[in-house]
Amino acid sequence: MSLYFEKYNLFANLLNQMREELDSSQTNIDKQKLRQAFISLKHFYLEEILSAKTDIVNNSYFQREQSYLTEISKQMRLLEMDITFFQGARQIATLRGRFASIHQRLSTLLEYCDNLTQSTDRENS
C-alpha cells in the first residue's frame, strides 16, 4: 500500500466522519463543531496531502493526481464558503439548502478520493 493510498484513505475517513456527523444531527447541527471539523479536515489536506512531494514516478498518474488535487482544492474552498453561509443562515429553507450543498460537496470529495485510491491501487499492482 503506497503512502498516497494511506493519506487519501485517511482524508476520506475524515470526510466520512464529517458527513456522518451531519447526517446524525440534521435537525440540530452544532455550527461551531461543524466549523472545527472543517478546520481539521483542511489542516490535514494542506499538511498531509498538498505539502507531500510525489514519490510516484509514473507520469500519467502524477498528471491525473494533479487534476484531482486542483478539483479537491476547489471543492474545499466551496465547502468552506458553504459552511460559512450555513453558520450565518437563519431561515429554515436557507439552512436546508446549505446543508444539502455541504452534503453534496462532501460526497464529491469522497468520490475524488475513491478515484485517486483506485488509480493508486491500479498503478501499484
Image (cartoon, rainbow, N blue to C red):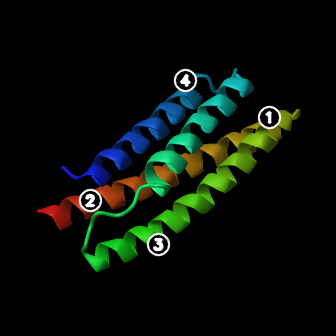
Name the mark nearer the viewer: 1 or 3. Answer: 3
Label 4 belongs to which residue? 24
Whether 81 is drawn above or below 92: the answer is below
Which numbered disc, 1 or 3, marks the residue that appears first in the sequence? 3
Task: Out of 55 and 94, give the one closest to the viewer.
Answer: 55
For marks 1 and 4, give the CA distance: 18 Å
Residue 4 lies, in percent from the top left, at 31, 53
For marks 3 and 2, give the CA distance: 15 Å
Residue 77 lies, in percent from the top left, at 67, 55
Residue 91 lies, in percent from the top left, at 87, 35
Label 1 belongs to which residue? 87
Label 2 belongs to which residue? 118
| Residue 47 disc label | none
Label 3 belongs to which residue? 67
For mark 1, give the secondary structure. Answer: helix
Which numbered disc, 2 or 1, marks the residue that appears first in the sequence? 1
Which numbered disc, 3 or 2, marks the residue that appears first in the sequence? 3
